[in-house]
Image (spheres, rainbow, N blue to C red):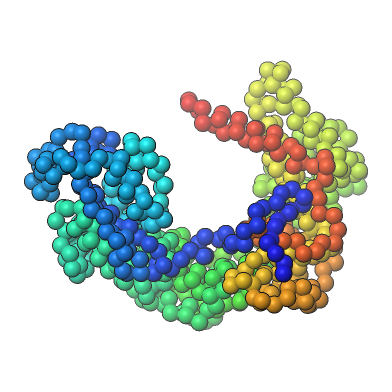
Amino acid sequence: MLGSPSRTSAGTRTAPSVGVQAAFDDIEPLLSEVTFVVVDLETTGTSADGDEITEIGAVRVRGGEVQAELSTFVAIDGTLPRHITSLTGITPSDLIDAPRLPEVMATFLEFSRGAVLVAHNARFDLSFLRAAAVSTGHQWPDPPSLCTLALARRVLHRGETRGHKLGTLAAHLGSTVEPNHRALQDARATVDVLHALISRVGDCGVSTLSELKSYDGRLSPEVRRRAHLTDALTDGPGVYVFRDETGVPLYVGSSVNVRRRARSYFSGGDTRGRMRTMVGLAASVDAVPCAHQLEAWTVEEQLIDSLQPPFNRRSRGPRRGWWLSPPRGRGTRGHVERTPGHDAALGQFRRAEDAREAWSDIVDGHGDISTEQTWESLVSGHDSEPLRATIARVDQLAADGAFERAARLRDRCAVLVRVLARQQELAATASLSELVLVQAGARRTWEVAVIRHGRLAGSGTVPAGASPMPVITSIRAAAATVRPGPGPLSGATPDQVRAVHRWIDSTPTRIVSIEGAWSLPVDGAYRLTGWADRAERAAAEHRDRPGR
């Protein structure tokens, strides 16, 4: 067997051997698998800073079933206001022999451990609970939470109810419990309201907590009912394509669970305005199943580039960033261009101006940078002296009292260090003729990726219980032939190599085989990233300084 995966990238770091996917929004449990603790508090007032909790009621539910209940009075230090007694029926005598707040909080925190906290007007209840935890010396776990008041405002149609108070909603949604300003009774009513609201959106593409919290009632019922268009999609990794009624692609995306992700758009899970417009135009959704997320990212990029769907931002700017190449012929200035015109081009810079300034700054700090050998040594990381000389000018300018010039140069140098460090890391991967990686997949499978010169050349899955190496050998044999091309990344695009690194970083990854030396240059820009960190912190502190 392959054993526990480990991860080493360009000789820089190793991750612990835990085979777990990391894309939370794609692997979070279904609502039926989530444990909720619905809580309600009675208090002496409305301020968590000065008022006290008098009663806690909580109901632990999962899959629509009540698992446990908690109800207790809480002894207070101050007096109980008469209007609170009139409202709740709680009297001072009820609190005399009640447990103290430290004991109650210890019990409640254990009762709610690992659950999503739910309350009607959750901001109020959670503010009191958080303050109580702090005042009693308990660590507040900052659990995920859900507010049924906010949810009701999004789910129910405008004018459907006379308001969104708990009593009004309980009556409207058919709760079997009538709220009465007592903690446990109100928590039980909130449970019924929660379940009723969830059932309202169950056929609208809402299946997880994040989808429920982002549900957008502004989508028309007709659009939400189109969630059935996703029923036939794979529940594994892949790429999805939304199309209009004529079959024209509208939007392309990828996920480790295609059906769930595509379905979430019909619940308003993506709150961007253009996505609501896109879903309103969608008449069909199709998918391309993939072996794993790296393949899905690769196919997604290919489809966006070929289909140019109007709702993908990348379609409007596929050539992002700028490259800086050394002078040509008898020229003395570097060339700034959209695509690298030289094997030792430097990029990508976000702005053309950043690239032009980088050339000027390096020339000012190291006059013979225009020689091809010196430039190539800088870009490859074999000699970073020109970069260090430029950074040294920052200190010299500051020593001479030219603080503003020093700050501007410092900020530009930090950008240059980042660009160089990223490029050298990508180039280390792109230089490899082959890199075979595996990650632990779902249901005891192994996900295999064959990387050649920074590009995904082959992918597949080792079934549970199968001998891994014969399967991996066949995947390698079927992988595409990739020959090194021109440019600083051997013909690969930065996005292609970044996708490989992103996949490696997503979960512990095991190297099966490697052809070539996967390492960073000894004198590379990564050794100066600590200086860039300090420079960026200094710039941020300067921007945040009062009076600016």
Which corner quadrant of the image does residue 226 belong to?
A: bottom left
Q: Position of residue 508 (x, y in %)?
A: 66, 58
Which corner quadrant holds the N terminus? bottom right
367 relative to 472, above or below: above
Residue at image position (33%, 37%) is: 136
Which corner quadrant of the image does residue 112 belong to?
A: bottom left
Seen from the viewer's position, the closer of residues 115 and 477 is: 115
Which corner quadrant of the image does residue 46 belong to?
A: top left
Residue lying furthest top in this view? 400
**169 displayed left or right of 547:** left
Q: Is residue 85 visible?
A: yes
**101 displayed left or right of 358:** left
Seen from the viewer's position, the closer of residues 281 and 57 is: 57
- Please state the total of marks drawn on the protein image: 0
Q: Position of residue 359 (x, y in %)?
A: 78, 39
Q: Position of residue 244 (x, y in %)?
A: 50, 77
Q: Is residue 499 visible?
A: no
**251 displayed left or right of 523:** left
Residue at image position (70%, 51%) is: 14
Residue at image position (46%, 72%) is: 263
Residue at image position (72%, 40%) is: 417
Q: Position of residue 194 (x, y in %)?
A: 29, 64
**356 displayed left or right of 230:** right
